[in-house]
């Protein structure tokens, strides 16, 4: 019997059985949710649904076979089984989400609280889904002995087979996977064991930096003398969301999607690149002053940024939020979250049109007596529900894509809907300029707009954003940026916008320019200021 088992229970077979166990028996909540979301009703959707277990199997099998090369396949299998079993139990029993906060809760819970969760049902569940499979795997491995060279061969074969399988699935269902997981980001918290691993890594990285002392920069910051006399300055910085430069009329797009801004005498920078392809990277990067080439997200997590320096110099700073958070850029300045106010006519189901950012903003301005910077963070053109980003009166281009399953819309529908979001962005930024003009008697005014990243609209089969920067298409990295200076600002600080426009059309700009440009615009002097990157610097004092 032993010889029969030894001949058949080879390490590849055991690893394959482990991958099957985890995929089919310990990911039931995940497949239940995907089935409910996909609602397969034709051959394509059924094949898409059935491809998911294969993706899980190929990935797990490959990892276990690679671990064989360093004799760690069995320990890794134990970790995978324990993580998947525990995740499935708590997801099914309590409906929890396996994320960083849940790991933090586990780390900070008391012994009494932990034991309160221990029930006969839980014990029986773990015995059946984790302990017994691990024991059986242990006994089976004791029967098998395999030399090292065959391990290498089997690992290579496993990688080739799994790689070919994953390639075939991605080639046929990439758009479906992209749409499903973009539209339902919580799904990843149900997929085991990756949910527990990702949550643990996220918690560790956060804990490692969260308690580090805050690094101060720009401690020498102060306002220039010419910004401390005469009328105070009032500046609005609009942080855009998911607006790609390709569809902006100011940049030569075939449609004039920015008719209001075209009349506002703004300086547009047509060759601007983002720091990242997601808000979580680009926003902290552009406010950090590190620049794309030297950006370190862990350092940015506990180091001061642009707003800290500006505030230290004596400028009043105020951040208004409509996009789920500033990603650390506004942690130490006054902030107002607009979605939580759920204002009638502006907000629906926890999301608001960007016009909410101007709600009662004049009241705040009326109270200001010194130099002031207002940052408004828009939801902009964030997909995939582009049709939710603008009020009905901004439905300029039809037909539109009225679903979050953007891969099922025609190119015309998708582009029309996205371009409608640009028309609304045009209105929102123009409203900021009008607000500043209405306060020109009391303040010297200016405005800057910069989107955090771009967006893919099906080019080469790619949708949305967030691909690794090195491989991301240009549509996800090419973003709009513009500067508006009131005539008063131009005259008072001797800035020639004609010179700026000329430079803008021939220079390669990026989000690296924001940090020094804002310091220069606000008259904040510090050793952190880099004059070569200040978009205004080369045109000061020009006739």
Image: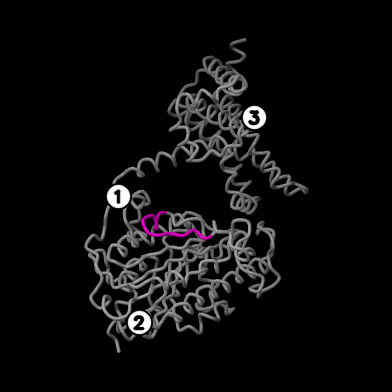
Residue that sits furthest to the top in the current view: 1
**Mark 2 vs mark 1, CA separation in Å:** 35 Å
- Could you tell me which quadrant the N terminus lies in? top right
Kindly identify which residue carries mark 2: 489
| Classed neighbour count for the residue bearing mark 3: other residues with Cα under 10 Å, few (<14), some (14–19), many (≥20) | some
SS for dot 2: helix
**Mark 1 vs mark 3, CA separation in Å:** 46 Å
Give left or right: position of 533 versus 205: left
* Residue 196 at x, y percent in the picture: 51, 36
Q: Earlier in the sequence, mark 2 or mark 1?
A: 1
Q: Earlier in the sequence, mark 1 or mark 3?
A: 3
Q: Earlier in the sequence, mark 3 or mark 2?
A: 3
Disc marking residue 246: none
Label 3 or label 2, whichever lies nearer to me, is: 2
Kindly identify which residue carries mark 3: 25
Asked if residue 435 is positioned above or below residue 45 in the image, the reply reads: below
- Could you tell me which quadrant the C terminus lies in? bottom left
Asked if residue 541 is positioned above or below residue 388 in the image, the reply reads: below
Magenta span = 328-338
Q: Residue at x 55, y 38 (%)?
A: 59
SS for dot 1: loop
Kindly identify which residue carries mark 1: 214
SS for dot 3: helix
Q: Nearer the viewer, residue 406 or 222?
A: 222
The image quarter containing residue 310 is: bottom left
* Residue 384 at x, y percent in the picture: 61, 59
Label 1 or label 3, whichever lies nearer to me, is: 1
* Residue 118 at x, y percent in the picture: 55, 22
Queried whether the magenta region covers residue 518, the answer comes back as: no
Asked if residue 310 is positioned above or below residue 162 in the image, the reply reads: below
């Amino acid at each position: 019997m032993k010889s029969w088992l030894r001949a058949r229970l080879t390490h590849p077979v055991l690893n394959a059985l482990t991958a099957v166990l985890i995929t089919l028996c310990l990911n039931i909540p995940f497949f239940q949710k995907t089935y409910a979301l996909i609602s397969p009703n034709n051959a394509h959707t059924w094949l898409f649904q059935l491809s998911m277990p294969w993706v899980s199997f190929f990935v797990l099998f490959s990892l276990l076979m690679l671990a064989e090369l360093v004799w760690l396949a069995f320990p890794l299998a134990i970790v995978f089984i324990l993580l998947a079993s525990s995740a499935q139990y708590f997801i099914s029993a309590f409906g929890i989400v396996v994320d960083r906060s849940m790991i933090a809760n586990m780390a900070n819970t008391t012994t009494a609280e932990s034991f309160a969760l221990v029930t006969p049902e839980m014990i029986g569940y773990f015995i059946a889904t984790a302990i017994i499979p691990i024991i059986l795997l242990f006994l089976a491995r004791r029967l098998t002995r395999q030399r090292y060279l065959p391990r290498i061969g089997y690992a290579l074969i496993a990688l080739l087979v799994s790689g070919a399988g994953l390639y075939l699935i991605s080639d046929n269902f990439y758009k479906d996977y992209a749409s499903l997981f973009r539209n339902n980001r919580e799904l990843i918290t149900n997929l085991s064991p990756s949910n527990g691993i990702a949550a643990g890594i996220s918690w560790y990285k956060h804990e490692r930096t969260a308690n580090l002392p805050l690094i101060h920069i720009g401690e020498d910051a102060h306002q220039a003398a010419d910004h401390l006399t005469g009328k105070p300055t009032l500046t609005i910085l609009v942080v855009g969301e998911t607006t790609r430069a390709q569809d902006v009329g100011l940049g030569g797009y075939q449609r004039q999607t920015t008719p209001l801004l075209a009349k506002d005498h703004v300086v547009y920078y047509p060759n601007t690149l983002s720091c990242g392809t997601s808000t979580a990277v680009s926003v902290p990067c552009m406010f950090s002053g590190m620049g794309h080439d030297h950006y370190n997200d862990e350092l940015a997590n506990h180091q001061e940024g642009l707003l800290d320096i500006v505030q230290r110099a004596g400028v009043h700073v105020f951040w208004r939020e409509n996009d789920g958070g500033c990603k650390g850029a506004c942690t130490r300045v006054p902030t107002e979250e607009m979605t939580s106010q759920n204002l009638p006519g502006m907000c629906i189901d926890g999301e608001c049109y960007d016009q909410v950012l101007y709600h009662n903003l004049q009241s705040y301005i009326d109270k200001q007596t010194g130099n002031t910077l207002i940052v408004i963070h828009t939801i902009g053109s964030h997909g995939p529900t582009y049709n939710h980003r603008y009020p009905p009166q901004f439905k300029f281009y039809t037909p539109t894509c009225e679903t979050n399953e953007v891969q099922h819309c025609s190119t015309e529908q998708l582009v029309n809907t996205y371009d409608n979001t640009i028309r609304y962005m045009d209105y929102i930024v123009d409203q900021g300029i009008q607000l500043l003009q209405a306060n020109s008697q009391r303040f010297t005014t200016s405005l800057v707009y910069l989107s955090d990243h771009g967006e893919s609209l099906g080019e080469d089969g790619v949708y949305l954003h967030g691909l690794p920067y090195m491989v991301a298409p240009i549509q996800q990295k090419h973003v709009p940026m513009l500067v508006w200076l009131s005539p008063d600002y131009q005259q008072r600080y001797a800035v020639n916008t004609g010179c700026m426009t000329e430079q803008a059309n021939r220079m390669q700009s990026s989000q690296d320019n924001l940090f020094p440009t804002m310091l220069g615009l606000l008259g904040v002097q510090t050793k952190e200021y880099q004059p070569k990157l200040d978009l205004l610097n080369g045109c000061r004092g020009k006739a």
